[in-house]
Amino acid sequence: MAVFHDEVEIEDFQYDEDSETYFYPCPCGDNFCITKEDLENGEDVATCPSCSLIIKVIYDKYVTPECFYTLPSVPKDKSNTCFPPPIENPVL
């Protein structure tokens, strides 16, 4: 079982569009990083390449990573690709 240095919301990360990587400062002076592809594959651990610390990334796994820094918009067909469709007849 992994021991996390911290748990950090994805919104607190910096995003580099060129490398499609999210960065967050590590106490060692380097940065924790996790790629957009990792997030799309359900990963939630950001690592630091310079030390052994890891952090847990808190994000909604049902929201696509490209939606983290964009405001949702509703296209003319009323569907929204950044959020899952509503559940039909939910069981309460």
Image (cartoon, helix red, strand yellow):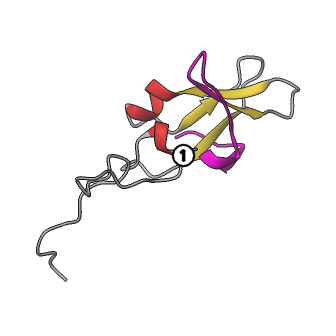
Q: Position of residue 22 (x, y in %)?
A: 63, 30
| Residue 65 lies in the magenta stretch | no
Looking at this view, is 2 or 56 the one in front?
56
Residue 9, placed above or below residue 36? below
Magenta range: 1-22
| Position of residue 76 in the picture relative to residue 64 (left or right) | left
Residue drawn at 56 percent across, 22 percent down = 20
Q: Position of residue 11 (x, y in %)?
A: 64, 48
| Residue 21 lies in the magenta stretch | yes
Residue 9 appears anywhere in the view: no
Q: Position of residue 39 (x, y in %)?
A: 46, 34
Looking at this view, is 8 or 68 the one in front?
68
The C terminus - image quarter: bottom left
Q: Which residue is mark 1?
A: 70
| Position of residue 1 in the picture relative to residue 9 (left or right) | left
Residue drawn at 11 percent across, 75 percent down = 89
Residue 41 appears anywhere in the view: yes
Looking at this view, is 31 or 89 the one in front?
89
